Amino acid sequence: MENENNFEVIIIGGSYAGLSAGLTLARSLRKVLIVDSGFPCNLPAKHTHNFITQEGQDPRQIAEEAKAEISKYDTVQFLYGLAMEGKKIEGGFEIKTQADEVFTCKKILFATGMMDLMPQIPGFEACWGKTILHCVYCDAYEVRNEKAGIMSNGYGAFVTSRVVDHWCKDLTIFTNGASTISSEQQEAIDRLDISVIEKKIAAIEHENGNLKSLKFEDGSSEKVSIIFTAVHAVPHCDIPMSLGCETLERGFLKIDQYQKTSVDGIYAAGDNTSSLRTVARAVGAGMTAGVYINKELIEDEYK
Ligand SMILES: Cc1cc2nc3c(=O)[nH]c(=O)nc-3n(C[C@H](O)[C@H](O)[C@H](O)COP(=O)(O)OP(=O)(O)OC[C@H]3O[C@@H](n4cnc5c(N)ncnc54)[C@H](O)[C@@H]3O)c2cc1C
């Protein structure tokens, strides 16, 4: 496996988790390829919060600075592209890209994140990450004085309302159809003075992603400037599954405390392994993966 397309480690996904692992492996003198297709999940967001030293920073800027830092280590190469296939070969793995390039390595790290699927409500996608938000720890502080809504139903609406109410006191739940909130949960919601609107949502009215109001199927509308909601997310990359990596519920890759998946030589870090999706956690997990990949490579050398 001694050729220019052969690496000790291939990192698929060059965002926060992948870049963090890349830095650790670069500093461990490892020959690394970082393949990235350029679609981190927070692409629509203008600011990153709750990540120390970078408060309010443009998320792209954080990644660019990390790339610039890693580029100073000459054992790391970056490839802008999409990994399409992975294959187990003797002594490691083979990765094929959409451009039909083939690379081999001893260990792989999947730092490929999750893909958020937008509901089919006109205007939703334009507001996602700007005024339709999913994470209170990322954004609630900035919008604490806004007229806010929760787009959810049943138990999810109940739990989310209690959390969001901690920041936003002018709060309405939009169930987008008949409420499935239990009477006990509804009593708790009433005690917080949160109203529930059960009308079907026809569209999100906005200007350049700045939410103005929700328009309902009955023609009425309700002014609101922020919505908190959860969207369905799926793994951004299915190569780990095709290589036999086990998954947990909601598609997260099963890993141990060293970020190792259920398949020897394959590691995973970042959003693809955890529902607590934050930059700080992705960076920490990437660093952990880098450490244990290097450790395993050292141990392999003594076998
Ligand atoms: C709208 C929004 C706002 C957010 N705001 C905050 C915030 O303020 N603070 C905070 O801490 N967290 C925030 N988050 C969460 C944070 O963005 C994620 O936790 C973080 O991006 C996870 O990093 P990651 O490296 O695991 O995955 P991602 O950043 O999603 O990156 C995965 C990378 O893998 C690449 N990839 C996937 N498949 C392939 C393939 N087959 N080949 C090549 N490349 C591939 C993708 O293109 C992408 O670049 C936000 C999330 C969203 C959706």
Image: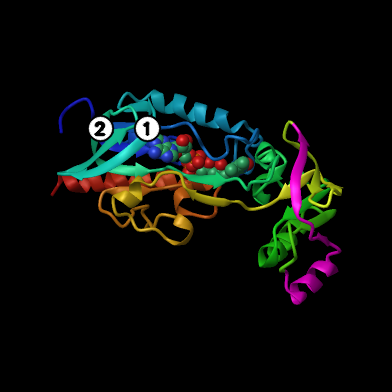
Element under disc 1? strand
Element under disc 2? strand
Q: Given the image, on which type of amino acid does mark 2 rest? A: Phe
Look at 29% across and 29% down and name the residue there: 100
- Residue placed farthest to the front in the image? 218
Q: Is residue 108 visible?
A: yes
Q: Is residue 20 visible?
A: no
Q: Given the image, on which type of amino acid does mark 1 rest? A: Val
* Residue 103: image tag: 2
Q: Residues within 10 Å of mark 1 (few under 14, many from 20)?
A: many
Q: Is residue 103 magenta?
A: no
Decide: is 247 above or below 298.
below
N-term mark: 2 or 1: 1
Marks 2/1: CA distance?
A: 10 Å
Cβ atoms under marks 2 and 1 closer than 8 Å: yes
- Magenta region, residue range: 181-207
The residue carrying mark 1 has its beta carbon less than 8 Å from ligand 1? yes
In the rendered image, which quarter is residue 157 located in? Answer: bottom right
